Image: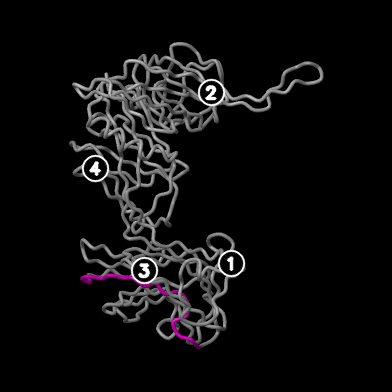
């Protein structure tokens, strides 16, 4: 039997330095760009992100962004017109370490190659092996400090990988690199920069093989996974995977040494390469002796002229009160760390028993009265487990006792009363993966001054 726990995922450091999609006519002042040449203008002729992009026109526009800190990853999109194979116009994204200076870039230079994109490595321009085609191309720069390796990519193709010591890029230039030449062509969009390409999660269990951390996008598609090392894990979410920053997603954590068994289910948040997050877990050390869990309903009724009652709006969710008693000073301070994040309205999770942390979504509709459900995994479900099934937005719910669980099928002792659909939630009845506090204050009470023992009551509701 496990312990009562509270968990939250807190961002300690943001890695996002720039995301520019040129949606504002005042983008230069909004994002702190410096105009190096021309009259930079947005256009809705083509766009990669949003409605607008930066158009290359006869003013030969070039803009520059200077950062106060080093970026080690950057990407942007260029819309090419591959029919243009003459002239000296050179549209590029340039990445600069001004202390060298060390200059790197990707773009089009017809004086170097008319059929292939051009790369700039340490100021030297040469042709890549990527053929020019009309449409959007993703240009990417990354510098891995640990190996001193600087990599340029066009799409998923590595066009340059060079060991260069001590690169500290702080400048990005977008647009025309020469202020003459014709014909003029191209558009730029979604320029991004982050401190590095890695997303780091700390606060994990140091074990063999250790916690298994899985990163998903917002639709539930697995992006990458791996085991912790020394209590943390760093995954490349920008360079190798080619994901634009920031992106919406969530993580799950499982104790790999135990099967694996589920340990944490995150809500959808905005991640970025360079972010550092910590999984904070408050462990009571025992199961809370008592708690309140009313299932609250919100309903709006209208009585028709015939006297019939009509429900116009309805949902239900658990509202929970936990009284944590006999806490030590250290436990109160650990709980205070949890509260520091929860008080902002951030989503957290709570479980009465840390051995019962199951949460999944149905992968098949049920046809009532159904005796079983289909889920992605039954890891963490045991015979006699009590599972709560909930229709989307809490429109219906019930608790069912497990008879058996194997592969992707959970079978119940008694048939379900309601019909449930793909995407509906199923969880342990006393586990709430997504909660919001309803308290206005953290109010521990010293109930035993001699032994310095505290009591704290916390209240929360499910976040639907």
Residue 171 belongs to magenta span:
yes
Estimate the spatial distance between the alpha carbons at disc 1 and disc 2, rounded to whole Å: 45 Å
Q: Earlier in the sequence, mark 1 or mark 4?
A: 1
Mark toward the viewer: 3 or 2: 3
Q: Earlier in the sequence, mark 1 or mark 2?
A: 1
Estimate the spatial distance between the alpha carbons at disc 1 and disc 4, rounded to whole Å: 43 Å
* Circle number at residue 290: none
Residue tagged 4: 228
Q: Earlier in the sequence, mark 1 or mark 3?
A: 1
Q: In this view, does 358 lie above or below 149?
A: above
The residue carrying pointer 1 sits among few (fewer than 14), some (14 to 19) or many (20 or more) residues within 10 Å by Cα, namely some
Residue tagged 3: 67
Q: Which residue is drawn at 26% across and 40% down?
A: 203
Q: Is the magenta stretch mostly helix, strand or loop?
A: loop
| Residue 408 falls in image quadrant | top left
* Circle number at residue 366: 2
Q: In this view, does 381 lie above or below 79?
A: above
Mark toward the viewer: 1 or 3: 3
Q: Do the residues labelled 4 and 3 touch (CB within 8 Å)?
A: no
Q: Is residue 433 above or below residue 430?
A: below
Q: Residue at x 32, y 77 (%)?
A: 103
Front position in the image: 433 or 218: 433
Residues in magenta, as a range: 164-180
The residue carrying pointer 4 sits among few (fewer than 14), some (14 to 19) or many (20 or more) residues within 10 Å by Cα, namely many
Q: Are marks 3 and 2 in contact (CB under 8 Å)?
A: no
Residue tagged 1: 46
């Amino acid at each position: 039997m496990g312990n009562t726990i509270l968990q939250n995922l807190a961002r300690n450091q943001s890695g996002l330095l720039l995301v520019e999609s040129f949606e504002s006519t005042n983008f230069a002042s909004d994002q702190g760009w410096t105009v190096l040449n021309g009259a930079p203008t947005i256009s809705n002729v083509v766009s990669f992100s949003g409605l607008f992009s930066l158009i290359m026109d006869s003013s030969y526009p070039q803009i520059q962004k200077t950062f106060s800190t080093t970026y080690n990853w950057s990407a942007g999109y260029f819309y090419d017109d591959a029919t243009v194979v003459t002239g000296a116009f050179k549209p590029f994204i340039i990445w600069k370490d001004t202390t060298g200076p060390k200059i790197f870039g990707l773009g089009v230079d017809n004086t170097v190659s008319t059929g292939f994109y051009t790369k700039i490595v340490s100021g030297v321009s040469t042709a890549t092996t990527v053929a020019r085609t009309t449409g959007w191309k993703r240009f990417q720069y990354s510098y891995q400090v640990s190996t001193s390796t600087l990599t340029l990519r066009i799409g998923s193709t590595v066009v340059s990988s060079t060991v260069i010591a001590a690169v500290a890029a702080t400048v990005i230039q977008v647009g025309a690199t020469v202020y003459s030449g014709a014909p003029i062509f191209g558009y730029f969009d979604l320029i991004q920069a982050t401190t590095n390409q890695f997303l780091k999660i700390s606060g994990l269990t140091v074990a063999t093989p250790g916690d298994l951390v899985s990163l998903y996008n917002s639709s539930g598609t697995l992006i990458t996974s791996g085991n912790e090392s020394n209590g943390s894990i760093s995954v490349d979410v920008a360079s190798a995977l080619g994901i634009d920053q920031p992106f919406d997603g969530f993580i799950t954590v499982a104790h790999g040494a135990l099967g694996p068994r589920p340990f944490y289910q995150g809500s959808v948040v905005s991640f970025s390469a360079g972010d550092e997050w910590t999984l904070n877990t408050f462990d009571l050390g025992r199961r809370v002796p008592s708690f309140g869990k009313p299932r609250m309903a919100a309903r709006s009724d209208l009585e028709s002229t015939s006297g019939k009652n009509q429900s116009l709006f309805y949902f239900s969710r658990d509202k929970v009160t936990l009284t944590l008693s006999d806490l030590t000073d250290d436990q109160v301070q650990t709980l205070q760390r949890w509260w520091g994040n929860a008080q902002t309205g951030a989503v957290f999770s709570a479980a009465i028993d840390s051995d019962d942390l199951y949460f999944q979504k149905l992968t098949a509709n049920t046809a009532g009265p159904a005796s079983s459900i289909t889920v992605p995994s039954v890891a963490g479900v045991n015979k006699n487990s009590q599972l709560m099934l909930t229709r989307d937005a809490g429109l219906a719910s019930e608790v069912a006792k497990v008879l058996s669980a194997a592969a992707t099928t959970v079978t119940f002792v008694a048939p379900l009363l309601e019909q449930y659909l793909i995407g509906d939630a199923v969880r342990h009845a006393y586990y709430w993966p997504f909660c919001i506090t309803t308290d206005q204050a953290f109010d521990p009470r010293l109930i035993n001054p001699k032994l310095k023992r505290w009591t704290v009551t916390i209240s929360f509701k499910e976040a639907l």
